[in-house]
Amino acid sequence: MDLKNYIRDISDFPKKGVVFKDITPLLKDPIALKFATEALLHSLENRRIDKVVGIESRGFFFAPMLASGLKAGFVPVRKAGKLPSKTLEEVYSLEYGTDTVEIHSDSIVKGENVLIHDDVLATGGTAKAVCNLVEKMGGKIIQCNFLIELDFLKGREKLKKYAVKSLMHY
Ligand code: AMP
């Protein structure tokens, strides 16, 4: 099955010059949704995972399903100010300015095996910040997985230390 048939390009969204990879056609198709979920699970090759960390917001579509399939727990990483309890935060650079991601400080226990998931790997800044948070908590990053990788933005170079698997490349 060619999952690229279920990805829609939206030009100039959310701002001029960006070609946004819209995954909602994939999400609404029952066969493509199941196929993508199983392919992401398969990429783990039976590694034991304790926690799946999903990145706000489109990482939340698949991460809980992956966690359920792996008999692991799901942990959300959110933008600043959204998580209600005590958090750890990581600030990272954007093209202009900075952004902050947060995780609940009690969500990962030292030594746990962690899978990180997001829908798109672009420049890798977000995923790297999330990796830093997980490592600060003593989590062991087993893999970072993505539905889509924008190869030309070289996000993988920021994640050199980790196993990175993506279902689709552009
Ligand atoms: P980055 O930190 O540059 O790797 O950006 C990753 C985050 O931005 C992910 O959470 C993606 O959901 C989102 N993102 C970046 N570029 C795109 C794109 N072209 N289409 C859809 N989402 C994108």
Image: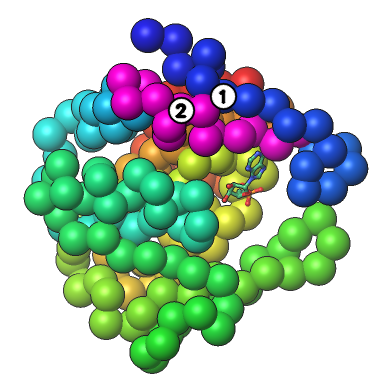
Nearer the N terminus, badge 1 or badge 2?
1
Above or below, 154 relative to 134? above
**Left or right position of 146 against 41:** right
Above or below, 16 relative to 165? below
10 Å neighbourhood of mark 1: few (<14), some, or many (≥20)?
Answer: some
Instruction: Find out whether residue 20 is within the magenta segment.
Output: yes
Judging from the image, what secondary structure is the residue with disc 2 in?
Answer: helix
Q: Residue 33: x, y in percent?
A: 34, 29
Q: Quadrant of residue 121?
A: top right
Q: Residue at x 25, y 71 (%)?
A: 108
- The residue at the far bottom in this view is 86
What colour-coding does the image apply? rainbow
Instruction: Find out whether residue 26 is within the magenta segment.
Output: yes
Residue in the foreground of this view, choosing between 143 and 162: 143
Residue 166 visible to the viewer: no
- Amino acid type at circle 1 is Ile
Residue 20 visible to the viewer: yes
For mark 2, what is the residue?
26
Which span of residues is magenta-colored? Answer: 19-32
For mark 1, what is the residue?
7
Q: Residue at x 38, y 65 (%)?
A: 76
Q: Residue at x 21, y 50 (%)?
A: 67
Q: Quadrant of ligand 1?
A: top right
- Amino acid type at circle 2 is Leu
10 Å neighbourhood of mark 2: few (<14), some, or many (≥20)?
Answer: many
- Number of marks present in the image shown: 2
Q: Residue 2: x, y in percent?
A: 44, 10
Quarter of the image where the C terminus is located = top right
Does the CB distance between marks 1 and 2 fall below 8 Å?
A: yes
Q: Quadrant of residue 40?
A: top left
